[in-house]
Image (tube, rainbow, N blue to C red):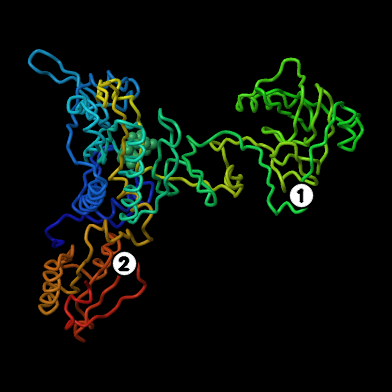
Amino acid sequence: MRWSNTLIPTIKEVPADAEIPSHQLMLRAGLIRQLMAGAYTYLPLGWKAIQKAAQIVREEMNAADAAELHMPALQPLGLFERTNRKEAFGSVLIQFDVPRGNRQIPMALGPTHEEVVTDLMSHCISSYKQLPLTVYQIQTKFRNEERPRFGVLRTSEFLMKDAYSFSSSVEQLDEIYDRMYRAYCRIFARCGLKYLPVEAESGPIGGDASHEFMIPADNGEDSIVYCETSGYAANMERADTGRTAPEIKTSANAGTLEKQATPEATSIEQVSKLLGCEPSQMIKTLIYVADEEPVAVLIRGDHEANEGKIRRALDAASVEMADDKTVQEVTGAPTGFAGPVGIKCKIIADHDIPVIENAITGANEADSHLLNVNVGRDYQLETTYDLRNAEAGDPCPKSGAPLTIVHGIEVGHVFKLGTKYTEALDAQFLDEKEKRHPIIMGCYGIGVNRIVAGLAETRHDEKGLIWPLSIAPYEVLVIPLNTKDEEVMQTAERYYSELKAAGVDVLFDDRNARAGVKFNDADLIGIPYRVVIGGKGLKNGEIETKWRTAENAEMIAVDAGIAPIL
Ligand code: ATP
Ligand code: MG
Ligand code: MG
Ligand code: MG
């Protein structure tokens, strides 16, 4: 493509209303222009980048055995009423009445296509033999976002790759979900994006039923908490809360551990003797019975103050507190809540127990215990955590290593949907025994615009954009220095046509403009490789080549032709 035949309206100044680098640079490099809040035109350079991203997405979807189709953006509102999503979407759903004869038909512009695709499958699928099946499209979505902002990162009209899987069993769904997850990793890697898959809201199936793919970026609207050591990563909005199980480490690092048979005590005096202290030094104890299995909970500190905490912990472990607070026999090494226990106790009720460090503790083995055990070093009491409010440096509940918190841009989302839509819209299949079941669904979205905007946000320098080869609007930019010079233009034209013929995506800056202007624009639009023709170099039979990311240019002989460039 010749620069003079396309539209690349670059801007020198930083546009006043663009707050973040990607928005500023995409405007300045002539990729996009705003029509109104939340609506942008993609100019030729921007559209080429979008097309390249879409093609990578398409190739990987096809490779993952998903079949491409295309569904209407214009949809009957009734479908959203049947799934209750008219309410759920609220003002995000763009809806209106369309006159047909003397009737008004309520319609919506699709914010996503679960309804349409499920309705389609309710008519096309009848037997388990047709399953599993995954379809996808790359199509415009409409969402009346409350705050369209940050250029094309959040717009009211955007290009989404949305895939939907249909299966007859949860196992089939799991397999497709994993395949899609892996395809997403390949897509974002091929697009040159740094990405982080994080746990997101879990669907009706529970477990790890949803992941978002995040581009770590200071201006991202989501917050992510992650741990490099354990691999835990989650959207903070939906991060885990819970408690860590008490952990007794019987590994060599405990050093002085010594296994011993559990001592027995049938009175509080014996307990105090075993623990090596006076009964007066003791504080409150509670003893609970869980099912058949006795469990001791020995509390360090004031029992009243801890009661709420204990009750919550017991609830979580489905342990009921015995009303009379008595117990027949307590074997230490509690399954639940480690403390300074490790004594077989008989008839100990609501008595006092001392606070002791370095006490006897459980070996997680019936009737045996460990001596000289330190809290922290050798065993860990249970702790509660709420990663929704985590702060950087807090310990990871899995590894104990410090957590990292960063902002991120959600670029993709995979979700095990279950049967929510197929039940609402009557999409069923018959199993081997001719029994009817709702089809089990998954859905998988990628924001194609966000791939491009995410790259602009994370790959630039003070001079402009830095595209990866795979998404760059053009791979090579040919710049003749003086378009009035016949030899310069002849050589440049030859490079341009030969590179094109060799299948290289090449832009030819044929403008009659000063070299400085051309170089500044070249850096701004960020084409990965540039070829400069003219000046002293050409007099010496050489042209100058330079990667956008390289410090220095390299000279290559004109005689060598385009071979060194390919
Ligand atoms: P967000 O949390 O940013 O609002 P979402 O969770 O509502 O996104 P999904 O419904 O999961 O988005 O849609 C799938 C993908 O579509 C998202 O991962 C994102 O990449 C893209 N996307 C969603 N909304 C927009 C938008 N308004 N503009 C551009 N891309 C969007
Ligand atoms: Mg949203
Ligand atoms: Mg989201
Ligand atoms: Mg999402």
Q: Nearer the viewer, residue 540 or 65?
A: 65
Residue on which disc 2 sits: 548
Q: Position of residue 133 (x, y in %)?
A: 24, 36
Q: Which mark is residue 428?
A: none
Q: Position of residue 504 (x, y in %)?
A: 18, 65
Q: Left or right: 43 with respect to 296? A: left
Q: Quadrant of the N terminus?
A: bottom left
Q: Left or right: 459 with respect to 62? A: right
Indicate which label's residue lies in the foreground, 2 or 1. Answer: 1
Q: Quadrant of residue 480?
A: bottom left
Q: Quadrant of the C terminus?
A: bottom left
Residue on which disc 1 sits: 257
Q: Secondary structure at mark 1?
A: loop
Disc 2/disc 1 C-alpha distance (Å): 61 Å
Task: Give the number of callouts.
Answer: 2
Q: Residue, x 22% and y 32% (percent of image)?
A: 129
Position of 57 relative to 120 (above/below): below
Position of 506 relative to 146 (above/below): below
Residue 154 visible (yes or no) = no
Residue type beneath disc 2:
Arg
Q: Position of residue 479 (x, y in %)?
A: 20, 70
Q: Quadrant of residue 512?
A: bottom left
Q: Left or right: 269 with respect to 155? A: right
Q: Secondary structure at mark 2?
A: loop
Q: Nearer the viewer, residue 197 or 354?
A: 354
Residue type beneath disc 1:
Leu
Position of 277 relative to 19 (above/below): above
Residue 494 visible (yes or no) = yes
Q: Position of residue 436 (x, y in %)?
A: 27, 21
Q: Left or right: 288 with respect to 222? A: right
Q: Residue, x 10% and y 78% (percent of image)?
A: 486
Q: Is mark 1 within 8 Å of ligand 3?
A: no
